[in-house]
Image: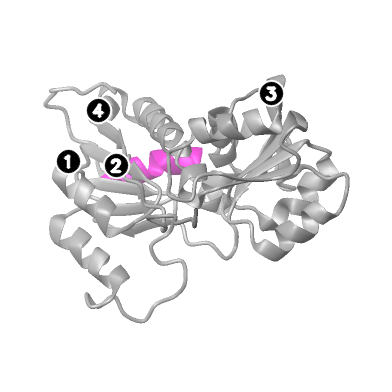
């Protein structure tokens, strides 16, 4: 993305958050969610922004090494209320590191999930779904019917489940857990539903939509087992949670870059962006008895 050596007034954190919230308004977030600015001085200048899935130590390391002024993560650092950010806790340690280093942290979670385009649009494109997409679970407050959780779309050409699962694996970052499949590997797949992040709650919606396969993450044993035991439903493809949401990072950075350009003209192009390639999936290794 373009970098300018102009001596114009720098972009501030307040400028960045205002531009970002035009694209991903906080009011689109679920009532239980925690989105927005976590730490940082709204008046501080921002020249480098790192996008990442998780606000963890490895991402903070990457941000400090690169010299980022702001980290934008999909997952919240403090989703639930806390009474302390003492540095002897993992979350408190991260808050202290960020503040000491002058690095701000901002979160876009379910407001980025429901946006159009949002997290599931990026996932759909990554696994090879092209053409028009529609929400799997529409946001009833959107009069245009474009926003919502999950997406449904078509493959360019039908694939058997085995080949489609391999295409999914190629389109996403490699993780220890890889991609898991439930269903007849020779089944033909044409229409696909996807949902970035944990998708148990949308199993019923995927069945009702009549799709051939449902791609999501964190499917638990009992709901998945019961689902595939009932005939007539889609095949299931379970990806690592991190991997299914990572494709959105580049989209989020592009949309923020565009929004800053519209809001700040040349000043808005003085900001550099980087998408973190640090794998922050919780699982580091899979062992199988041979």
Query: In the image as oriented, which residue stretches furthest toward the bottom?
Result: 83
CA–CA distance in space, label 1 to label 4: 21 Å
CA–CA distance in space, label 4 to label 3: 40 Å
Q: Can residue 74 be seen in this view?
A: yes
Closest to the camera, between mark 4 and mark 3, is 3
Determine the secondary structure under disc 4: helix
Along the polypeptide, which appears first: circle 4 or circle 3? 3
> Pointer 1 and pointer 2: residues touching (CB < 8 Å)?
yes
Residue 110 among magenta residues? no
> Pointer 1 and pointer 4: residues touching (CB < 8 Å)?
no
x, y percentage for residue 235?
74, 42
- How is this picture coloured? one colour
On residue 50, the disc is: 2
Residue at 75% in and 48% down: 140
Determine the secondary structure under disc 3: strand
x, y percentage for residue 239?
55, 46
Q: Give the range drawn in magenta.
A: 13-24
């Amino acid at each position: 993305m373009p970098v300018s050596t102009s001596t114009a007034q720098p972009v501030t954190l307040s400028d960045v958050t205002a531009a970002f919230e035009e694209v991903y308004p906080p009011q689109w977030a679920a009532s239980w969610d925690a989105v927005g600015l976590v730490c940082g001085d709204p008046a501080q200048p921002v020249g480098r922004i790192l996008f990442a899935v998780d606000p963890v130590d490895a991402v903070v390391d990457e941000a400090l090494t690169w010299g980022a002024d702001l980290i934008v993560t999909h997952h919240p650092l403090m989703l639930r209320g806390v009474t302390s950010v003492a540095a002897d806790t993992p979350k408190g340690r991260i808050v202290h590191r960020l503040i000491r280093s002058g690095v701000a942290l901002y979160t876009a979670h379910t407001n980025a999930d429901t946006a159009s385009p949002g997290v599931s649009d990026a996932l759909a494109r990554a696994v090879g779904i092209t053409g028009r997409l529609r929400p799997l679970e529409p946001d009833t407050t959107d009069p245009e019917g474009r926003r919502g959780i999950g997406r449904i779309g078509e493959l360019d050409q039908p694939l058997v489940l085995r080949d489609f699962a391999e295409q999914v694996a190629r389109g996403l970052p490699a993780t220890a857990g890889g991609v898991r499949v439930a269903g007849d590997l020779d089944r033909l797949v044409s229409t696909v539903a996807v949902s970035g992040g944990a998708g148990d709650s949308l199993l019923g919606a995927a069945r009702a939509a009549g799709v051939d396969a449902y791609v999501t993450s964190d499917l638990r044993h009992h709901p998945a087992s019961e689902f595939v035991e009932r005939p007539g439903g889609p095949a299931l493809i379970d990806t690592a949670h991190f991997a299914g949401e990572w494709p959105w990072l580049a989209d989020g950075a592009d949309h923020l870059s565009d929004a800053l350009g519209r809001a700040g003209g040349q000043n808005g192009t003085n900001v550099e962006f980087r998408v973190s390639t640090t794998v922050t999936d919780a699982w580091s290794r899979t062992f199988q008895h041979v």
